[in-house]
Image (cartoon, rainbow, N blue to C red):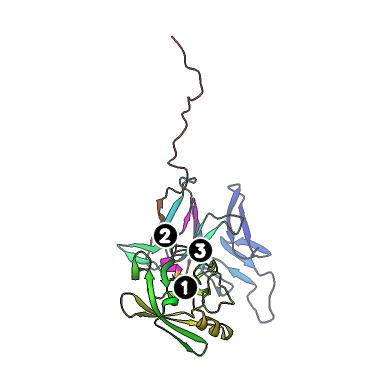
Amino acid sequence: MPNRTFAFSHRGGYWKTRYSFFSNCYAYVNKVLLSFRVTMAPTQRDPVWRHNLGGFTNFYGDQGGAGFSVSFNANPSENKILKSISVEATNNSNPASIVVANNSTTDNQSKVSPVIAFDDKGGILYGHIQGQNINTNGNVKYMGTLLATQAQEIVSVGTSIVIRAPFQWANGGGSNVTQGSKYVWSPVGNDQVYATSLNTPIDLTDDYGSVPDAVQYNGMIDDNIADFSFGFAADAILPFLSNPFDFDMYSVSPNITYGDMLKGQYADAVFTFPGQDWELFSVNLEYEPTTYDHSKAPRMSASRGSRRRRR
């Protein structure tokens, strides 16, 4: 646990605040709050620090930042799509923020997404909550099948193979191709996904940055012909040239932009601010309820099963 000091108010009889450092002594002298270093280096000459003087979040000459967290738990049994954060504050606050959905002591239950930089709109700061940083069906799209068995041309170039072949687009056609996409493939009828070599399947359960970028899509030549370049292991090139097979192609787009939006029943927003004078009045979370839960299921009548009085 980081260094913490909790302050107790003897007059009020409650815990009043906390400090993000540890001191072996706190004291008020003539209404001035003083604290003392626990340890000192030989070069340090300031064992006593006078608080509430000068700049903010500066202790013993070390400038820090400020931050706080808030929780949103309206209708805690309702699943929500978490969309954006708005901050009513002075526009010099320039906060950075992350949103944690379903915060829990179990690590794999909570989900974290950063908030894209806040924009000042009409005196209120708005920030969009980014998509989840994992690959899901929100950013992994089936493009179609490359019919290498009907290829017009297959050329071996070093450790790569260039295939010019008919391409059967999935529904939507070229709309499945997004800017910045990476491409992965799977032999038809095979449940393994590859990006470089048949000997090395890849795991799509991580994030966009973990997907190898070895398959190049060279663009459409006409409506039905596509060019793809594949990096193959050297010992896999000759077998493929002698016995080609068809590929199912998938595009993997950046999950921060195209991934599933953050979802959960409740959320925490954590804000950090630079060490300057700022004011904050309100924090709001925009969300959209979903029907992924039982909230719209028919409810059993409270009187069901009870006896009715007969006249």
Q: Name the residue under label 2.
A: 280
* Mark 2 crowd level (few <14, some 14–19, many ≥20, 10 Å Cα): few
Q: Which of marks 3 and 1 is in front?
A: 1
Name which residue lies at 44% across and 36% down: 298
* Image: magenta residue range: 255-269
The residue carrying mark 3 is 67
| Residue 92 drawn at (x, y percent) | 39, 68
Question: Which residue is at the front of the view, 84 or 140?
Answer: 140
Q: Quadrant of the N terminus?
A: bottom right
In this rendering, the answer to whether 4 lies above or below 226 is above
The three-letter amino acid code for the residue at tag 3 is Gly
- As measured in the structure, the alpha-carbon distance from the residue carrying label 3 to the one carrying label 1 is 51 Å
The secondary element bearing badge 2 is classed as: strand
- In this view, which residue lies farthest toward the top? 311
Identify the residue at horizontal 47%, vertical 79% (top origin): 215
Q: Earlier in the sequence, mark 2 or mark 3?
A: 3
Q: Name the residue under label 1.
A: 247
Going by the numbered disc 1, the residue's amino acid type is Phe
- C-alpha distance separating marks 2 and 3: 11 Å
